[in-house]
Image (cartoon, coloured by chain):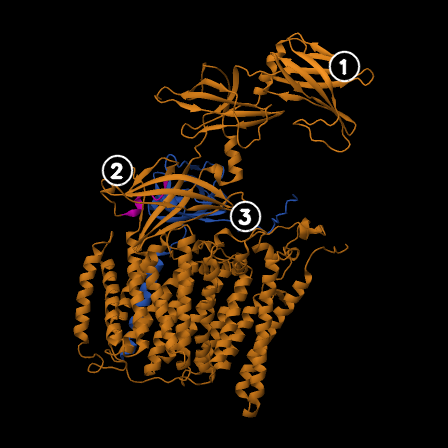
Amino acid sequence: MKKSFILGILFLMTAIILLVSASKDITSYSNFQEARKSGNSVKIVGQLDKSKDMVYDPVQDANRFSFYVVDKAGETVQVILKAAKPQDFELSEQIVVTGKMVDGTFIASDVLLKCPSKYKDEEVYIKSQS
Amino acid sequence: MQPISYLGEHLWVQHLGYAFLILAFLSAIYTALISIRSYYVQSDWIPIFEKWRKYGLIIHQISLIGVIGMILFMMSSHFFEFHYVWEHVSDDLPKKYILSAFWEGQEGSFLLWMFWNTILCWLLVNHKNYFTWMNIAIIMLVQAVLMSMILGIYFFGYRIGSNPFLLLRETMDIPLFNNPNYVSLVKGNGLNPLLQNYWMLIHPPTLFLGFASTVVPFAYALSGLITKKHKEWLRPCLKWSLFSGSILGLGILMGGIWAYEALSFGGYWAWDPVENMSLVPWLVLIAGIHSHMIAQATNYSIKATVLFYFITYSLVIYSTYLTRSGVLGDTSVHAFTGLGLGWQLVAFIFASVLIPLYFLFRERKQIPVIKEEENLASREFWMFIGSLILLFSAILITFTTSIPVYNKILDFVSSSLSIDLSSYHRSAPVDVIAHHNKFQLWISVIIAILSGFTLYLRYLGNKLTGVKKGVLISLLIIVSISAVFTAIIGAQLHRTNYPIYLLLFSSLFSICANLWYLIQTYKLDPKVRSASLAHIGFGVLLLGILFTGLNRRNIVPNKFFQEEEFFDVNKDNLDKHFLLFKNEPKFAQGYWMNYVHDTLEGRFRKYNIELLRVDSLNNTQEKFNLHPDIQYDNRMTKVAAANPYIRHYWNKDLFSLIAQIPIVQMDVESANKAEDSLQYVLYNLKLNDTVFGRKHYFVLREIKSDFTSKDIASSSDDLGIQIKIEVGDETDTVKSVLTPGIIFKSNLAYRFPFEHEKLGIRSEISDTLIYSIANEAEKLQARKFSIKEKESITTQDGISFKLMGFDRNPSIANYIPQSGDIAVGARLEVKINDKVHELMPVYLIRDSRAIQLPYISYTKGISINLNHIDPQNGVMDFEYNILKIPETIPVRIAENAPRTDYLVMEIIEFPGIIMVWTGSLLMVFGLAMASYFRRKL
């Protein structure tokens, strides 16, 4: 058999193996219920529950920010982010938290905020007359 | 309805801009068609066609510069009636950022891309050869497609492109546009503060030149197929591919530096989709360059080279789609927002894939192929393997980065089949960085090793001729040297496992092998030097990545002191941020850190944090200050960005960033909310009496009446009171002191609250104090009297008044004369406590209303009002009040005040980051040098 043919097969196989193993990292978005069951690190999409308290008291602990997230299944869970409170947190329309469930609270290592685009078209700012 | 005729709009700019746009679009198509046609004319027509196509290019160039010039003109003139200007410029935007504002928007960045395309065309014309005008035809067709992205015309009901000359009122429908004079009212949004950075002046043009220049190898490869000259294009094209590789690499590198210097994530690369999609075309381009070199030397892999260049350009277009269609919204921090160009870009991608593939398919039999197999001991064999590995790398990165695209496709399918497929939506890996690193680590190992030994092999070599004598011995020596270094350097790394050692070894091997090769061949061929340099750069870059990735550490004051000794290898368990109170130094990992002060300068709050590096005996080794800052938005209402401050050393960087500041400094709204949430209690404090609050007790120790402030111009009649309150609680041994103050000036009061940050106490003297100052006298009887000019009277409380006369132009503190005023000031001589003063209350008639302006002098202890003048007999009625500093002071005290003298920050030590920059620069330089040496080919 020709060398280049063997080589081609070999490369194709490697490519498939690599892609399959890469796709293992790619999961679907989870929810709190699944996170509780599995105990694994997951990504959850949800919204900030603005009716509940957001607590960040840097004097107590600069790396603890707690807030509540409603996931797509409608469940509200307290989330504790082990870092300082991100900027523009209150403005977020959608929130993706990465972490796992520990004793009923979701310990997040990372949050990704989806904020409304910086300036909404409807808002045209008017010069002050002074 | 009558159309409104608006005032102040610069419609001529719009008309001229449109004209240039359409001319540029049409001239691009014309130039493309005439250039292609010129390949199929008889030779006596050629000089005429030469002229025609050149004129076409000139007209296109002029009209394109016209479009760009009009936009820059309206931006720098602040014509806010244009949507593009309104969106990206504001009155307070510094002039130097006009260019950044220009390419902040999609339309501007498309124009930048097109501008580079035309420059490339002229360079091609300058290096004329058989393929030149076919290349220009291809570039001009691309140009026409790009131009269509900003045309903004309607075609069978579909809008094509987004026009940069649209008026604000054409893009939205709001009541403001009922005002014919709206132009003078509109205020620009301004440039995103994160982009107001000098890197944003040089990074986008460089990156776009990189993207644009990939069109040249693409065009050459396609021209070769179209004109059926399958080998001839290789030689003139190579310098362009190398140039493109160099510039695109530089552009990506600048992006990394910008992210590191201006963004808050603390790093130069985060596997963000936008970053990935600039890297991927570069990887394939580099693969293409390597197979190109093989093709030129051996005639192997011509087809592969063509494919690599096609893929590169398709990936550039795909990357444009990802960053500009809004599809990345969920996963990237710096994607453009969508302009509704999605379908147009998708069509562009398909065209960029299918059209070249058609020609490749047509010519598949004609492209020369060598029947003989590559030899295992030949250079081309291993080089080609390297190219394939680079392609793998690109495929893997693209695969994960495209997740939002799969979701988009699912949405499209589900909406056209009307079934819900949203449960099939996929998310990016939980830890994106670990995901990519896991694969790219192995790819780097292979590439580094290949780049180390392949140069030692010969093109078309075999077992006998491929490997030169002595090469095996040199390689053996290099391997052992690299192994020794691996052991030494590996010991310096904080976290290691065998893949890390392998990567360390392979990068060192690549450096050593290429260095040795460079020394050996230095005199032979300058072109070889550039290859060695670029490969050394790759090795150094890998070393840098290893060091910054594994040895980076957050400098954090530890809660548990021993923790430092048992340094936890899993750095994620350690805190990143820490809090500093003003002037309360903290110790962390060899540094004393102190937050000295902060100052507000324009839109920036600049911090000064002093660091002392000490040795184990607490002797100061080094003293320096860090100056990170916080940037407020264009309207100064809230925090827009935190800008890092980096201190550079030869072997490491200290990266510092403010993560949080007290809420009262963050935005106006929260500041007001915070003030409202304070629970003030009013205490009437008597000298030396103790009152008990919620947590503390308070004793008034002193009342001073000579308080002044430099903020308020003082006059001799003002009263400034400052009190001293002792604060304590059961546990306090050291007592604290509060010293709020208040200044009364005529009938105004200025409060000077006092904040005790540590105790969380805010105190202020209540302005109700004025009542008790005045009311002391109320216990006495009527304080009214009536006298005529030159008369005197002594009241019951022993004060004598004499009316000396009148002043028709009185000048007292609380009276500002206006025309039409009728004012009478009564000159009264008063004797209080054996002291004689002159007072002047004013009776004023303004707009036929009578106004009494009292004369208030706290120092003289009296306020007096001229109540009424009887014009018939000249009797004037006065009313006075004795002012006395009371013994009881009303003080409002809140004990729940949050502290406002702190910051939360992050300090990261980046060892070896310089290797990342020098390594990347060496690669860029090597590629540029390789291109330079081939400039005449």
Placement of B312 over or under B422, stated as above or below: below
Q: Colour of chain B?
A: orange
Pick the residue in front: B419 or B902.
B902
**Mark 2 or mark 3, earlier in chain:** 2
Q: Position of residue A46 (x, y in %)?
A: 45, 46
Q: Amino acid at mark 1?
A: Lys
Res B740 visible: yes
Which residue position holds label 2? B561
Q: Are marks 3 and 1 in contact (CB under 8 Å)?
A: no
Placement of A49 over or under A123, stated as above or below: above
For residue B572: magenta?
yes
Which residue position holds label 1? B788
**Same chain assignment for discs 3 and 1:** yes
Q: Colour of chain A?
A: blue
The quadrant holding residue A84 is top left
Q: CA distance from mark 3 to mark 1?
A: 62 Å
Q: Amino acid at mark 2?
A: Phe
Q: Residues within 10 Å of mark 3 (few under 14, many from 20)?
A: many
**Same chain assignment for discs 2 and 1:** yes
Q: CA distance from mark 2 to mark 3?
A: 43 Å
Say the numbered circle drawn on residue B634: 3
The quadrant holding residue B102 is bottom right
Residue at position x 76%, y 30% from top?
B821
Res A12 visible: no
Q: Are marks 2 and 1 in contact (CB under 8 Å)?
A: no
Kindly identify which chain the residue marked by label 2 belongs to.
B
* Residue numbers of the magenta segment: B570-578
The quadrant holding residue B462 is bottom left
**Which dot, 3 or 1, sits closer to the camera?**
1
Kindly identify which chain the residue marked by label 3 belongs to.
B
Residue at position x 61%, y 74% from top?
B26
